Structures are given as structure tokens and as C-alpha cells.
């Protein structure tokens, strides 16, 4: 299964994904996909550099599926991280 | 690594040694096993002797020896291991140890105040500017709710003095 | 309630300054995340699934209307317009940023609040009976002792790096509403042999992956010695508690490993050295703290029973609410009102900023400007005149805060679960919502009577599932969420741990299973006064198990 790198931003804690241009995005669809172990290691190394530069905290690899240009996290946990709580919250709309 | 006492960097006069190679002269800091194996010889030395305790070595084992020791060093294998705070309080309050009580190992700046309150008076610190950092860390709090091993007045005492 | 003087304020202000500098050092890269994490945790700042989460102490659940307004302001300015009240009587913000946190702490300090030690391996917020000082069955107001222990534990230099977190709860009543038996230390006020009030000291209770009902280490302790005795326990725990395994580090593991008798010997030996020492609380200090909790000047009200009875007879909806949400007050003519944060389909314990403001207003109008947070995630207005109950109820109804379900099946405890929490295995909130929508009929709920359902999203048990009459534990089965039911738990003076009912169920089968359990109970109970728990204790698990699973209790196959 392809993999992507995710982390939380240091300053506001928000969930972010590593892009192909070594940047971070809140949109999982912008993630750089690693097709094999070698690419995954490269992405993770880029994540570690961003951690050392105080951009993100604790980057790690997650399994993801890509279909029709959409990227989907494989686990429930990561899907909730990518898209937010599955229940409405805050003031009633 | 610097040794800080009373806010100043001081030279460590104690040589930390293991059992095989105890020098014939000079102050030495030995581990508990060495102390227990060579207690009589070490007691006979002219120069000061200290013992370093690991965090799972309770200071009670030294209770009878304390009058002859110049230094007890308590090791923090990680800053999360807080046993030595209680050991320090017992050494000061219960066993009435008056020699140097030194914090060694993973000693964080944020912890210096707590250590000092519990009775430590010497600190091995990893820092670019130990004296400045020591001073900053000790200035973090001026109010304390509870009594500890130091002479800082608790808020309760101050309130009832008003 | 307790008010900060210059010492309390100075200490909290200094903490804000210290944390502001630590955050700056972290942002500048002078501290690594490993070094910074324990510092932020000691200030209540977690990193959860989506963002930082800030846990703010509500000491033993007491809030002034001014504080609640400030919590609303913080929710609007720094979060997403809401907060979440927890089983430790605290409030959590789910979406704060690291950079804002020092400002949030400063805003809290303005209203005499803080987040110190709301996380970390130290003594956490001291919790208490939410009816403290007002309950008719109370021997003494537990808040006096809570405040003394709070001050003793804050920045206590010896116990900032315990083997694990440490939770203390206090009840002043024989009817335990503070779950003291499932705390690291539980203090239960009772009369000693000579009639003097003192504490039964319970130690080593807890939930989590190894649930334990606490054991009595001392039958009766003079209240003025409570700090010294707590120090003896903390010192023994600090020196001998396990530090090699995170999951075996709580005091309950130590107590179980050495046995309560040996543990008592260790503590008492330490206590012999401390007894009568500087931790003995002077009488003048006890009266000084007592004065903060002096009741308001209640009015001598004529007995309003007849008027209230007429109002109740006229209005069935009001009567339902009164039946469930209003409790007896020790002062004639007054009542204690519990405001349910468990409206159908909402997240248990959540409250938005507008409603925080509105409740602060109602507290000012009807209840001396004070509120309490209960460990069951509701709010309490503790000094309401009986003749104003109807008006208050109307105001609460307009705010959709008059759900008449306190103590009933839909008054569920639920942890944030996998929707928010980095530790969770499954989502708790959707399960709570399903159940609350399934059991919407108020008459049916009142027929069922007292029944607690507690839901945790993982074995850490923040949702207290072990002590729910019905407990629901979320588990992960090969990537899918399942829910394990337990029966017979209780957290009151007869605390007990629930028994596992059978194999875990998928989420969509949970409400039906609860209905089956309830119907089984209704069929088995001797009369309408026998609660679910009493029936369960009388008949045992078998009829419930058979009703839910039939003869098939083999594990559910994961689709």
C-alpha cells in the first residue's frame, strides 16, 4: 500500500501532510505518495528535517490509498485526523 | 558539564572513582558497592569521601555512615525519575545529613528549584551559561504553598504572620 | 467559594511567565519536543489528534459566574466556541494553538484559574461531591479539605515527578457522589467512635487497564492531619512505586503488590515521623479556609411545598424535570438543580460559549453567582429558591438545557474517544448519541429509573466504564470499532467493578443490546423501587447474557 507522511504543526498543532515540494498541507489530497520503501524513507527523512527545523512534531508514515486523484487514509484513526471529528461539535447550527 | 554551588561554578574537588583504582590521595566519590566493600579503608582516609547513590538505592543504607561522609550525590537516571527528591528530604530531615548533597545525571534547569527546596545544594548542570541559567531557574517562583526541606516560608506561614 | 489572595495570584502569575518563556524557547528550537513535552503537560497542554488540547482545572468543580464568562471568552477567542467538561470536573479546549497558550493561561489567571498540574505525573485536580456544602446528608463541607490539599500539592517540590499521575477525591457525605473508591487516595468523612468527624482514608483505587476498588488504609484520621498523612502516602509511593513500566506505575499496583497490610505498615512508619509536624493544619487556618465556603445568607422562606406541588401538577414537562434534575437542599425552601449537558444527540459534557454566558447569567439570577461541575459531566446550580424553580426551568428550556435525565439512562458519561483523543481505539460520542436518540421517551426513562451508562473509547477508562451500571468499552478489532459491555459497576459508597457480558458488539448493535438489557431488567425487577443495579446484584449476569446473546457467546466474526 502507498504511504504518506503526516505530523502536527508545532505552532498550532494542526494535522498536516508532507507535499512533493517538501512543504506541509492540511489537505490530505496534497500529500506526496511513496510507492515503495525507498521513497517512504526519503519522505520520512524530509519530515525529520522539518521536525528539526521546528515546523512539525513527530512526523510518521501512514498507509493511504489513492484513487481518482483522491487520497484516503487507510485507518479510521488517520481518516479522523485528516478530516476532523465525525460528530458535529461547537454551537448548534 | 558544570558543578554549581550557591549560584557559582565551582571546581569539582571530588574524583569519581571505581573500586579498582582508588587514588591514594585526594577527595573521592565512590559508588555504593565500593563504599560497602571498602568502608573501613575509605573511612581511614585523610581527604573527604563521598558516595553516589543510584535512584534505586535508598539512602537509609548510609544512615549510620553519614557523619563520616562529606558528599552524597543522588543520581537522576532520567529527569522523570523523582525518587531522589524524597531521598534528599529524608537525608536532610530524618538522617540530618549536613554535608554536600549533589544532584547528578539528567538534571533539567526547570527542576533546580524543586531540588533545592528538597535539600540539594550542589548541581551538575549541562548548559552554555550555567550561572545565568541557574539564576533564571531559581527566580521562577517566589511563592510556595508548602513547607519543604529549605527555609523558604510557606504561604500559610506568611498569611498568618500578617 | 475560595478566592485568591496576593500569594495565590503571585504564584499563578509566575507560572504564566515561566510557561511563556518555555514556549518561546520551544518555538526558537532551544527545547526539543522531548524536553518540552513534560513542561507543557504540567500546564495541561496535550497534543491530541487534531490540535493541542488544554485542560483547565476547575478546583473540586467550583466555578463562579465570572469564571464561566471568562471560559466562554476563551472558547470564542482561542478555540471553536465551545469547551468540554470532564469526569475530573475540569474543562478542556480542543483546538488551541501553542502560541496562544500563554495568553490563555494569563486570561485564566485574571479570574483566579489555572491549568497547573492538570496533566503530568503529579497530583492532579482535587475532586469532590458536586453538592458540597448543600447536601442534606453531609457531615462536613469537603471543599475546605480539598482547598487545603490543593494548595499543599501545587508545585510541591518533592512530588512533581511521581511514578505516575495521582488523583485525590474527597466526600463529606455518607452517600458518595465523588467516586472516592476509584481514586489513588479517597477521603470519606464520617463520625469516629467519639462522634468527632474524621476521614476514612482509602488508597489504591483506580480504573484504567487494571481497575481496582481502593482499600481502607486508615479507618479514621483527624482532619487536621490530612496533609501529613497524604504526604506519608505520597512519599512511600514516590520511593517504591514502579517506574519501569508505564502501565504498572500507579499506586494501586504497588498496594496490590505488597498487600494493603504491608503498605499500611510502610505508610504508618513514615507517618510516625511526620505526625504532629509542620504539616499539621493549624485551627486558625482551617477556620480561615472554612470562611470562604460559608453559605450565603439564605432567606427564611415560607414552605413553598404547596405552591410547587400545584406547579408540578399543572405542568408534566416541568414535573419530569423536577423529578430527575432537582435534589434536596439542606436549607428549607431551597433546591439543588443539576443542568444536564446530555441533550439527545449532543456530545456529553460539551457546552458552547453562548450557553456558558447564558448559564453564568442564570447563576447570577438564581443561584448566588456560583456553579459546580459534576464528575458525571453536568453543571449544578446549588442555591435555587424553590419558588423560582419554575422560572429557572423555563429559562433553561429556552436554552435547550432542561433535558430531564439526571441519574437516568441517557445521563451518560462519555470520554472524547477517537473523534479527538490520540489514545482512543474507538469513538465514544457516536455511541452515546445513538443511545440518547434511541431512548428519547421521558416516561420510559423514568420508568427505568436510576441507571448509569459509562462509555470509554479505550482501556484507559476515562469514561469510567468499569463503574457504570452498564459499561461500554470501545475496542479495535482488526481496524474496526467494537464495543464491549460490562454490567454491575458502581462508583458510590458500594463501589463495584462491572462484569463482562460477552463478546464485543459492532456499534449499530449497541442501542438494541442496551434495550434488551433494560427490558430484561424491567421483567425481572421485584418492584419499581428496585434499581437496575439492585436487580443485577440479586439475579446475576446470566439472564442478561442470555437475553443479549442467546446461547451463542462465541466471539463476533469481524466482517
Image (cartoon, coloured by chain):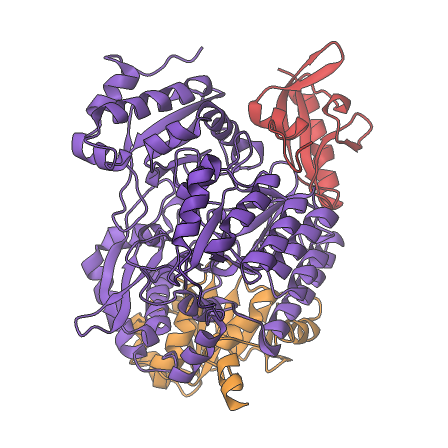
B99 or B39, which is in the foreground? B99
The correct choice, above or below, for A40 with respect to C367 in the image is above
**Residue C266 position in % (x across, y down):** 25, 66
C470 or C448, which is in the foreground? C448
Occupied quadrant, residue C313: top left
User: Horizontal placement of B67 versus C55: left or right?
Assistant: left
**Residue C74 position in % (x across, y down):** 69, 52
User: Horizontal placement of B146 versus C356: left or right?
Assistant: left
Quarter that holds the C terminus of chain C:
top left
Q: Give the purple chain's letter.
A: C
Q: Farthest residue in the right direction? A: A21
**Residue at the (49%, 81%) spot, across then down:** B156
Q: Give the orange chain's letter.
A: B
User: Horizontal placement of C378 versus C467: left or right?
Assistant: right
User: Horizontal placement of B3 versus C473: left or right?
Assistant: right
C468 or A61, which is in the foreground? C468
**Residue B64 position in % (x across, y down):** 29, 81
Q: Give the red chain's letter.
A: A
C176 or B114, which is in the foreground? C176
Amino acid at each position: 500500500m502507498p504511504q504518506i507522511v503526516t505530523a502536527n504543526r508545532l505552532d498550532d498543532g494542526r494535522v498536516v501532510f508532507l507535499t512533493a515540494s517538501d512543504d506541509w498541507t492540511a489537505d490530505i489530497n496534497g500529500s506526496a505518495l511513496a510507492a515503495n520503501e525507498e521513497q517512504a524513507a526519503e519522505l520520512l527523512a524530509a519530515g525529520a528535517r522539518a521536525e528539526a527545523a521546528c515546523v512539525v512534531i513527530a512526523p510518521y508514515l501512514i498507509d493511504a490509498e489513492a484513487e481518482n486523484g483522491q487520497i484516503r487514509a487507510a485507518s479510521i484513526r488517520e481518516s479522523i485526523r485528516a478530516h476532523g471529528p465525525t460528530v458535529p461539535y461547537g454551537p448548534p447550527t | 558539564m558544570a558543578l554549581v554551588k550557591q549560584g557559582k561554578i565551582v571546581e569539582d574537588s571530588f574524583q569519581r572513582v571505581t573500586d579498582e583504582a582508588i587514588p591514594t590521595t585526594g577527595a573521592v566519590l565512590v559508588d555504593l558497592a565500593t563504599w560497602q566493600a571498602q568502608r573501613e579503608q575509605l573511612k581511614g582516609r585523610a581527604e573527604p569521601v563521598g558516595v553516589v547513590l543510584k535512584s534505586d538505592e535508598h539512602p537509609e543504607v548510609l544512615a549510620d555512615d553519614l557523619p563520616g561522609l562529606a558528599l552524597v550525590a543522588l543520581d537522576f537516571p532520567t529527569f522523570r525519575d523523582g525518587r531522589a527528591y524524597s531521598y534528599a528530604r529524608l537525608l536532610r530531615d530524618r538522617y540530618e545529613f549536613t554535608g554536600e548533597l549533589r544532584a547528578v545525571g539528567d538534571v533539567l534547569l526547570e527542576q533546580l528549584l524543586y531540588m533545592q527546596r528538597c535539600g540539594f545544594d550542589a548541581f551538575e548542570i549541562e548548559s552554555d551559561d550555567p550561572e545565568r541559567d541557574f539564576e533564571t531557574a531559581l527566580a521562577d517562583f517566589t511563592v510556595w504553598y508548602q513547607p519543604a526541606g529549605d527555609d523558604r516560608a510557606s504561604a500559610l506561614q506568611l498569611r498568618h504572620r500578617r | 467559594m475560595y478566592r485568591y489572595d496576593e500569594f495565590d495570584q503571585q504564584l499563578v502569575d509566575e507560572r504564566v511567565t515561566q510557561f511563556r518563556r518555555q514556549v518561546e524557547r520551544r518555538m526558537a528550537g532551544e527545547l526539543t519536543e522531548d524536553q518540552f513535552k513534560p513542561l507543557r503537560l504540567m500546564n495541561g497542554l496535550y497534543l491530541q489528534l487534531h490540535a493541542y488540547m488544554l485542560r483547565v482545572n476547575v478546583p473540586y468543580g467550583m466555578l463562579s459566574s465570572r469564571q464561566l464568562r471568562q471560559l466562554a471568552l476563551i472558547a470564542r477567542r482561542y478555540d471553536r466556541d465551545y469547551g468540554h467538561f470532564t469526569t475530573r470536573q475540569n474543562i478542556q479546549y480542543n483546538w488551541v494553538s501553542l502560541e496562544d497558550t500563554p495568553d490563555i493561561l494569563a486570561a485564566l489567571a485574571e479570574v483566579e484559574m489555572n491549568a497547573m498540574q492538570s496533566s503530568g505525573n503529579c497530583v492532579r485536580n482535587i475532586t469532590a461531591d458536586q453538592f458540597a456544602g448543600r447536601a442534606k446528608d453531609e457531615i462536613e463541607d469537603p471543599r475546605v479539605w480539598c482547598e487545603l490539599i490543593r494548595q499543599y500539592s501545587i508545585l510541591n517540590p518533592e512530588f512533581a515527578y511521581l511514578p505516575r499521575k495521582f488523583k485525590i477525591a474527597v466526600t463529606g457525605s455518607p452517600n458518595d457522589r465523588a467516586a472516592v473508591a476509584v481514586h489513588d487516595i479517597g477521603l470519606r468523612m464520617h463520625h469516629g467512635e467519639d462522634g468527632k468527624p474524621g476521614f476514612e482514608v482509602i488508597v489504591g483505587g483506580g480504573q484504567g487497564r487494571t481497575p481496582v476498588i481502593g482499600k481502607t488504609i486508615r479507618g479514621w484520621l483527624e482532619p487536621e492531619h490530612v496533609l501529613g498523612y497524604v504526604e506519608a502516602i505520597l512519599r512511600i509511593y514516590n520511593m517504591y512505586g514502579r517506574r519501569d513500566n508505564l502501565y504498572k506505575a500507579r499506586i494501586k499496583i504497588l498496594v496490590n503488590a505488597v498487600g494493603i497490610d504491608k503498605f499500611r505498615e510502610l505508610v504508618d512508619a513514615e507517618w510516625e515521623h511526620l505526625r504532629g509536624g509542620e504539616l499539621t493544619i493549624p485551627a486558625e487556618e482551617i477556620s480561615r479556609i472554612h470562611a470562604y465556603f460559608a453559605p450565603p445568607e439564605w432567606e427564611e422562606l415560607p414552605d413553598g411545598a404547596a405552591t410547587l406541588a400545584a406547579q408540578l401538577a399543572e405542568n408534566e414537562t416541568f414535573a419530569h424535570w423536577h423529578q430527575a434534575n432537582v435534589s434536596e437542599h439542606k436549607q428549607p425552601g431551597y433546591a439543588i438543580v443539576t443542568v444536564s449537558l446530555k441533550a439527545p444527540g449532543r456530545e456529553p459534557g460539551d457546552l458552547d460559549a453562548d450557553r456558558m454566558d447564558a448559564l453564568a447569567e442564570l447563576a447570577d439570577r438564581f443561584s448566588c453567582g456560583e456553579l459546580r461541575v459534576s464528575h458525571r459531566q453536568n453543571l449544578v446550580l446549588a442555591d435555587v429558591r424553590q419558588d423560582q424553580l419554575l422560572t429557572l426551568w423555563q429559562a433553561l428550556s429556552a436554552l435547550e438545557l432542561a433535558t430531564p435525565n439526571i441519574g437516568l439512562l441517557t445521563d451518560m458519561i462519555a470520554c472524547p474517544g477517537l473523534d479527538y483523543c490520540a489514545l482512543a481505539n474507538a469513538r465514544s460520542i457516536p455511541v452515546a448519541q445513538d443511545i440518547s436518540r434511541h431512548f428519547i421517551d421521558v416516561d420510559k426513562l423514568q420508568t427505568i429509573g436510576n441507571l448509569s451508562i459509562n462509555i470509554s473509547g479505550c482501556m484507559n477508562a476515562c469514561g469510567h466504564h468499569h463503574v457504570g451500571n452498564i459499561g461500554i468499552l470501545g475496542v479495535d478489532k482488526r481496524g474496526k470499532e467494537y464495543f464491549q459491555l460490562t454490567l454491575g459497576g458502581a462508583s458510590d459508597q458500594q463501589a463495584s467493578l462491572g462484569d463482562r457480558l460477552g463478546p464485543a458488539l459492532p456499534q449499530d448493535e449497541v442501542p438494541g443490546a442496551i434495550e434488551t438489557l433494560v427490558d430484561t431488567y424491567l421483567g425481572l425487577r421485584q418492584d419499581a423501587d428496585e434499581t437496575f443495579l439492585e436487580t443485577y446484584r440479586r439475579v446475576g449476569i446470566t439472564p442478561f447474557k442470555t437475553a443479549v446473546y442467546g446461547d451463542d457467546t462465541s466471539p463476533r466474526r469481524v466482517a
